[in-house]
Image (cartoon, helix red, strand yellow):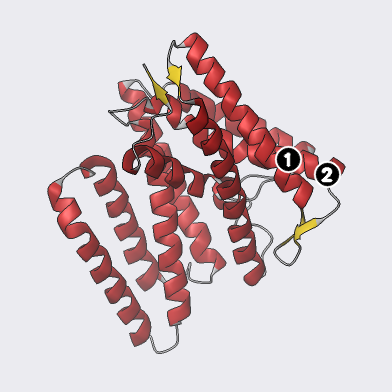
């Protein structure tokens, strides 16, 4: 527990200043660079998990295409050519990588390649959504993107402590033996409360209006998705017989171990904001 707390304190000491100064010109590039680095590290962890980290003829093209896709979406997200040719490029790339896997004659199984591609797109779109939320031009993205981390990490914290002290009924023991129904409910409650508290801070300090109904519903959905994201990665680790994706964060594991719950939350909030046009903060 002590190791876990110390790692969290050190990580936050590095991460929080990046968030605070992400609005400045230099801070913006540092923030985007950090998210890009986390994405590549998460990709490597996923490739190692499924046994492909040393299959360079598969890994390198996937990494290069993932990086290019992330840059294209971040910088040219509204460009007509990206919307017109982006999907075709993705389909062609998937076809090529699957063909390379087939030509390896069993050295790399199709199932492994398909798993890597799925994880790559899942990770890339999850982390990219954080950047898109942060720099939304038509909304208050400088507040909205923080809900990704609030929703993911406070859900995890609430579920852990409620489950530890009140948990009696196992949630999905075959996937994550320690998680409980009581913990899951506690995580949802803590997430909703944290969203409301954050809304009160924003409305009072920054004089913004808050769509409270949307905020509370977003807190509920974000918490559920956060726990699903955690459970999905737990299931993946259990299938491949590993405890953690990496050891870079003592007491926590790897980047995917720490951000697994944030990925679906970021995509949800981005869709809610950019596609559904739901305004949580407004003047």
* Residue that carries the numbered disc 2 in the rendered image: 164
**186 with respect to 135 (left or right):** right
* Residue that carries the numbered disc 1 in the rendered image: 186
- Residue depicted at x 55% and y 44%: 221
- Residue depicted at x 59% and y 65%: 236
Q: How far apart, in angstroms, are the residues tagged by discs 2 and 1?
A: 11 Å
Q: Nearer the viewer, mark 2 or mark 1?
A: 1
Residue 132 at x, y = what percent?
A: 34, 38
**256 with respect to 78 (left or right):** right
- Residue depicted at x 65% and y 57%: 244
Q: Residues within 10 Å of mark 1 (few under 14, many from 20)?
A: many
Residue 161 at x, y = what percent?
A: 78, 39
Q: Say if residue 3 shows up in the picture.
A: yes
244 relative to 146, above or below: below
Q: What element does badge 2 sit on?
A: helix
Q: Of residues 47 and 132, which is closer to you in this image?
A: 132
């Amino acid at each position: 527990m002590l190791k876990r707390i110390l790692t969290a304190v050190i990580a936050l000491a590095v991460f929080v200043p990046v968030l605070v100064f992400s609005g400045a010109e230099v801070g913006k590039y540092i923030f985007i660079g950090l998210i890009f680095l986390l994405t590549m590290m998460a990709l490597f962890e996923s490739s190692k998990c499924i046994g492909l980290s040393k299959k360079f003829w598969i890994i390198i093209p996937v990494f290069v295409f993932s990086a290019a896709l992330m840059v294209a979406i971040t910088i040219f997200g509204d460009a007509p050519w990206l919307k017109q040719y982006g999907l075709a490029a993705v389909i062609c790339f998937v076809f090529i990588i699957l063909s390379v896997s087939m030509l390896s004659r069993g050295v790399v199984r199709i199932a492994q390649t398909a798993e890597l591609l799925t994880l790559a797109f899942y990770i890339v779109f999850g982390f990219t959504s954080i950047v898109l939320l942060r720099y939304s031009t038509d909304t208050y993205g400088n507040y909205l993107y923080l809900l990704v981390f609030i929703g993911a990490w406070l859900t995890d914290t609430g579920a852990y402590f409620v489950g530890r002290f009140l948990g009696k009924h196992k949630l999905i023991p075959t996937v994550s033996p320690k998680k409980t129904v009581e913990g899951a409910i506690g995580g949802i409650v803590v997430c909703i409360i944290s969203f409301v508290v954050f809304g009160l801070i924003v409305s009072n300090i920054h004089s913004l209006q808050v769509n409270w109904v949307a905020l509370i519903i977003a807190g509920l959905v974000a918490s559920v998705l956060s726990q699903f994201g955690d459970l999905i990665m737990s299931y993946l680790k259990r299938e491949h017989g590993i405890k953690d994706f990496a050891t870079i964060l003592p007491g926590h594991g790897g980047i995917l171990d720490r951000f697994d719950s944030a990925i679906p939350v970021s995509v949800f909030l981005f869709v809610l904001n950019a596609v559904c046009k739901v305004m949580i903060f407004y003047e």
